[in-house]
Image (spheres, grey):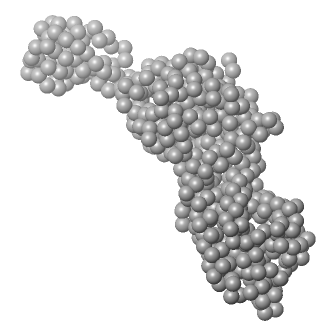
Amino acid sequence: MNVSEQWVAFTTIFIKEVRRFTRIWAQTLLPSAITMSLYFVIFGSLIGSRIGDMGGFNYMQFVVPGLIMMAIVTNSYSNVVSSFFGAKFNHSVEELLVSPTPNYVILLGYVSGGVARGLCVAMIVTTVSLFFADLNIHSYFITISIVLMTSVLFALAGFINAVYANSFDDISIVPTFVLTPLIYLGGVFYSMDLLPDFWAAVSKLNPLVYVVNAFRYGVLGVSDVSLPFAFGMIALFTAGAFAYSMHLLNSGKRLRQ
Amino acid sequence: MTVALTIENLSKTYENGHQALKGISLQVEQGDFFALLGPNGAGKSTTIGIICSLVAKSGGRVQVFDKDIDEDFPGAKRYIGIVPQEFNFNQFEKVFNIVVAQAGYYGLPASVANERAERYLKELGLWDKRDQASRLLSGGMKRRLMIARALVHQPRLLILDEPTAGVDIEMRRSMWEFLKGINAEGTTIILTTHYLEEAEALCRNIAIINHGEIVENSSMKSLLKQLHREFFILDSAADLPATVELEGFECTRLDDHSLEVGVEQGQSINDVFAQLEQQGIKVSSMRNRANRLEEMFVNLVEGAA
């Protein structure tokens, strides 16, 4: 396939993915808006007003970046894992496998779909957050870079999960038992400074800590971790996830007999 | 003559140790309408899966026109259109979008994709259903949708795995006519089917696969010539005598109006009519007892078992 044909194939997958999550918007876009609004009301307004400042900002301002990032992570992951596993489950993935579309185009198509949903939800949640807190972006470059890198990383993670999944249970186990705890323990609701030294050190093994803090730096200008290190870690995880996803596609694992 | 498909010593052993293909070889010429027959589990779908990349081969060589799948699989895939046995499209997607998306996977620009989707959906009688979710189609319509999807990039080799399974007779006949038309326009077609009269009606050449081995590979005509004996059912308008005997022929009285007569190779059915005439029996109609190919198929498969 030449480059323009690959572009057609890529846009075909991308448009199909966007059409899918917008068609079922009540399942894909609306829940995050409602959940995050509840977080803003409960943790930001009701409980947050009693907590006081954190990291030099009022609690509502402190949690908003983490909650936006939480929405991006879960949605970019969920989009790819459910869409690609669905395609495996109903065998429509064979439409792609029998075509000359290169594997990296297939991967980029699905990942871009996940990124698109992550960005849509990020915009919705950010808009909702403006009803509760003033957001003055500290660095647009860092904010946008982190949003894109994170959504790519978790879309890739969703793809890997989808390849290994054999049932619908398998696509909910990782988000429920791995992703959600990591997000909650990733500094969304608290600063690492509050943790005892031991648990602060343990937390640094959690990749979500870097994602949340780098994004918080982009929005508020404060972070519990070194920004270059956070960028490096996210880039490393993303490169690793991409390489592994390509390995799965090239080997045909769980896709070809 | 250009060869559309070359398979040499193709083998496949699955992870569980099952040897689905034991080094099969065959060739399909360009423009052919080729039947690949065999009982369930014989290796037909494995062979097709390897050709279109859904199954990884364990050994051997596959070439589609001038492209060896080990050297240029994307190039080979461009030549192939596949209609699988199972429905493998997104049941929530609209009919038109399914066909257009498939064109996109082959790099066809939207204008060409839309035009071809319209053409094939119209030819296959699905244009009225284009905005319907595919799950709402009947079984026959779903099969035709898969044919439209397989044709949208205009493949030179169309592979149909049981395309008329579960389709009513009228629909099956119209699909036959459509496939004959596609074949007449130059598309090479490989067909697997359990309806042997379908293979007999459509295909010029045939391979029979059993237990992962090719047990027969010849033209349909020469295969049918191998039949040593054919059975005919002869119907009489008047009541038949209590016993009917035909010298030199195996003859069974089925009921008051029907006889079954076996005619060996080299014998003439005119002799049957002559003897019946002498006995005062007038034949009002005649038909084959069973599909001739079916009989041959059973002989070959049972012989190889």
Is residue A137 rendered to the left or right of residue B91? right
Up/down of A35 relative to B198, above or below: below
- Residue at 26% x, 9% y is B271
Q: Can you tell which quarter of the image residue A218 is in?
A: bottom right
Q: A226 or B223, which lies in front?
A: A226
Percent across and percent down for residue B177 are: 47, 20
Up/down of A121 relative to B139, above or below: below
- Residue at 58% x, 54% y is A25
Q: Is residue A5 visible?
A: yes
- Residue at 83% x, 73% y is A220
Percent across and percent down for residue B165 are: 42, 36
Number of numbered callouts drawn: 0
Q: B169 or A69, which lies in front?
A: A69
Up/down of A204 relative to B127, above or below: below
Quarter of the image where the N terminus of chain A is located = top right
Percent across and percent down for residue B40 are: 45, 43
Q: Can you tell which quarter of the image residue B269 is in?
A: top left
Q: A147 or B214, which lies in front?
A: A147
